[in-house]
Image (tube, rainbow, N blue to C red):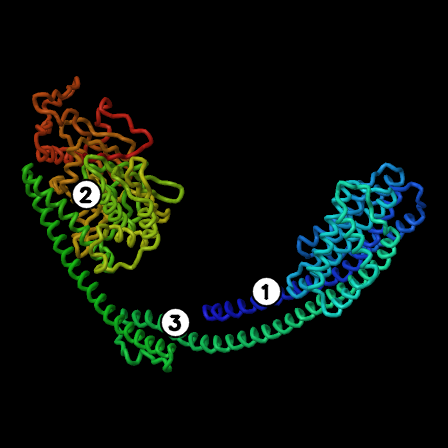
Amino acid sequence: MVLLVLALIPSLALAALWGVSTAQLALDWRLQARHAALAERGITLTGDLAAALREERRLTAEILADPETSPTALRQQRERTDKAVRAFRSGTGSGTAGLHGELRDALARAREELRVLPEVREDVDDRISTQPVAFGSFTLMIDSALKFTDALGNTDNGAVSVRAQPLTDLMWANETLAREDAVLTRGWAAGHLDKTERSDLVEWIGAQQYLFEDRIASRLPETEAAFHHDTTLMDAWHTKTVVEQTLLQVPLTEPEDLPREAGRWREAMEELQPRLQELTGRLAADFNRANADSVRDLMVRMVAASAIGLGAVVVVIALTLWLTGSLRQRILALRDEAARLETELPAVVERLQRGEDIDVDAEVREVPHGDDELGRLGQALNLARRSAVETAVRETEQHRGFERLLQRIARRTQLLIGLQLKKLDEMERRHEDPEMLEGLFDLDHLAARLRRYEENLVILGGGQPQRRWRRPVPVLDVLRSALGEVQDYRRIQIEVQGRPWLSERAVGPVAHIVAELMENATAFSKPPNPVEARAGLVGRGLVVEIEDRGLGMEPEEYDRLNAMMAEPPRMDMMSRADDARLGLYVVARLAAGLALTLEFRPSVFGGTRVIVMIPAELVADAPEPEAGAGAGAAPRSGADADADTAEDGGRAPASAAGKPLPAARGTAERGEPAGAPAAPSADLPRRSRGQAAAAVAGGRTGTQDGGSRAPDDGTGADGAGMNGAGGGTRPLPRRVRQASLTPELRNPPRRPGTDEDASPHAHPAPERSGATVGAFQRQSRITRGPASEQDIPPADVSTPQPGGTAREDRE
């Protein structure tokens, strides 16, 4: 395409240049031809018109000077003048389009001045007009006609303009002589001349002598110069000269004195005017011949230039197309080879990924090339092809080996983490000392976070996390599980609308995604600002929103992250080693696997709001309670009952902060049926620090069954998450009021008619979190006991929260 453009642009430019030059020459030729035609008609018509107007002007002056003069000659002359006017109007009424402005204006003025002729005649006939008015009117019409001839002589051709100069000078000289004749005729008829007329005569005689002697005689062609010379030797010319000299010799103080050669003057004028008209006609014919020759020469030049230019354009275009076609074929061949390399290289990489051995020499095909510039380009393409294939082989092998190494290390580390978590579980079951449990919970929390980081490495290395669940899990438990894998979990507030459940195949990825987003929100927002995590059902499925109150990001960064979530890029661990947001790549990969939709938006608080849209096919219904569960066994959530462990020791989502319930963990590890009864209450201390801290934080979590709570027994335990999977057959424990106060300030209320003071499970002093955890254990045993929901005192049942939301606040 570029070659065609490079070929067409010069060709089109040359063709356009030829077209413009030819059009300009044609336009000049057409205008000059039109100008020549108008000049040929206009000079003759203007000469006839000027002569008729001059004679009528002379006769009008004579009849105004002597009313007794017969008007017959004037009427006959008016008829000849009208004929000349009609011929002028008809001959100059068309063919003026495209002429230069000076000529158009002069012609318009000449035609316009002729309109006053009837009025001038009417004033003369009615004896209203005076000598100066009538003389001035006729003179103005003649001057306009002569200026039109001057404009006809102004052409772009210098030779034509030179030929026009003596013609226009002769016509003006004839006009001055005619003015002199008209004034003298009136003066002889009236018998005197006034000072103004004597002054005008002196001026006209001087102008006439200058034109005839200085301008016309020196510029006439040889033949016309001889004719003019013969005219000046005539007796009539001598008489004209004598009369003029007499007028010039008479002082202006004697206006009554006139030359006495009146009769001889009239005879001289009648003899000279035909000679001057003939000389004018000769000069007009010479001017017209020059105009015609100029037009013909211009036409010849136009045709020759057009033909030569057209031939050059055709040759250039043909040569350009031939060269372009040749180059295009060679370039297309190189392009096909490059395109073939583009398709062959991914095929080579795919074969390498399948474990095939690649022979570089067999895969690389040499492109034939010459010795010119395109030949060197073909040689470079051969080198590039070989280098690309060799580089792809090396890079693919290295990348494949690195991924295997990364996954192997991550799997082994996950196995060790799983063993560590099992060991921590055993230690938590054996110890009830608050300080010891607090340390164990810290280790458990760190191990849960480390397990998530190792799963990140597996995902970034091309693998998939191996934690699996066989049954749906409540969304609240999934969010709590994610909360348990976040470092600064105390700042996170959880709120779930209703009691949605998540499909078993989405539990692990969604928990991992939410944990990464929570971690990111706490990392990029300043403590102690809270981070809110909300979930609820919508028309298209389930939506999870995580909102922080940090500084937010630039609009371009939001666009970049949303684009990455829509189309996760191929992760190259080596090139992304310095990226501080590797967790977002993990989120994008996991979301793509489940067809989740993630969108980052600015928060109204100034931070960032992340919306996770889970499709409706991943939202499950609450499972039916398992058959065979005894009356003394507490119902378990789907997450606790159905968790499958993998080689990394994966566990189900914890009910509070990332730690599974003992019964669910034990059942999954021993391969027992999913509906096995819960483990004894002695296993309940197996909870992470995050879960225990959630309980210590004040038990502000709403229940999934409408907000019912356990009686205020002084334990301070938060049993949220221990409610049954089938709709919450057991009430959740409620936090103890005034539990955060010192013993001196605490004043627990007493209820009339109760034996709360004698209860063996009275609330211990909450100076340390370990003591509170012990209380949590004891209350958990009571909750798992045979006590029924009817045993809860009515006075302690709190009002359900509006909207049926389950909310958990982390401080």
Residue type for callout 1: Val
On the image, numbered disc 1 is attached to which residue?
20
Q: How many marks?
A: 3
SS at mark 2 in the image = loop
- Left or right: 155 in relation to 778: right
Q: CA distance from mark 1 to mark 2?
A: 82 Å
The correct choice, above or below, for 320 with respect to 505 in the image is below
Q: CA distance from mark 2 to mark 3?
A: 52 Å
The correct choice, above or below, for 312 with respect to 194 in the image is below
Out of 718 and 267, give the one closest to the viewer. Answer: 267
Inspect this view and state whether residue 722 appears.
no
Which x, y percent locates residue 350?
30, 69
CB atoms of marks 3 and 1 within 8 Å: no
Give the mark, 1 or 2, whose residue is nearer the N terminus: 1
Which x, y percent locates residue 305?
61, 72
The label on residue 339 is 3
The label on residue 484 is 2
Which x, y percent locates residue 717?
16, 32
Q: How busy is the neighbourhood of tag 3: few (under 14 within 10 Å), some, or many (20 plus)?
A: few
CB atoms of marks 2 and 3 within 8 Å: no
Is label 2 or label 3 in front? 3
Residue 186's quadrant in the figure? top right
- Left or right: 163 in relation to 478: right
Q: How busy is the neighbourhood of tag 2: few (under 14 within 10 Å), some, or many (20 plus)?
A: many
Which x, y percent locates residue 493?
24, 36
Is label 3 or label 1 in front? 1
Residue type for callout 2: Gly
The label on residue 67 is none
Give the mark, 3 or 1, whose residue is nearer the N terminus: 1
Residue at point 77%, 59% (across, down): 43
Residue at point 77%, 46% (across, down): 250
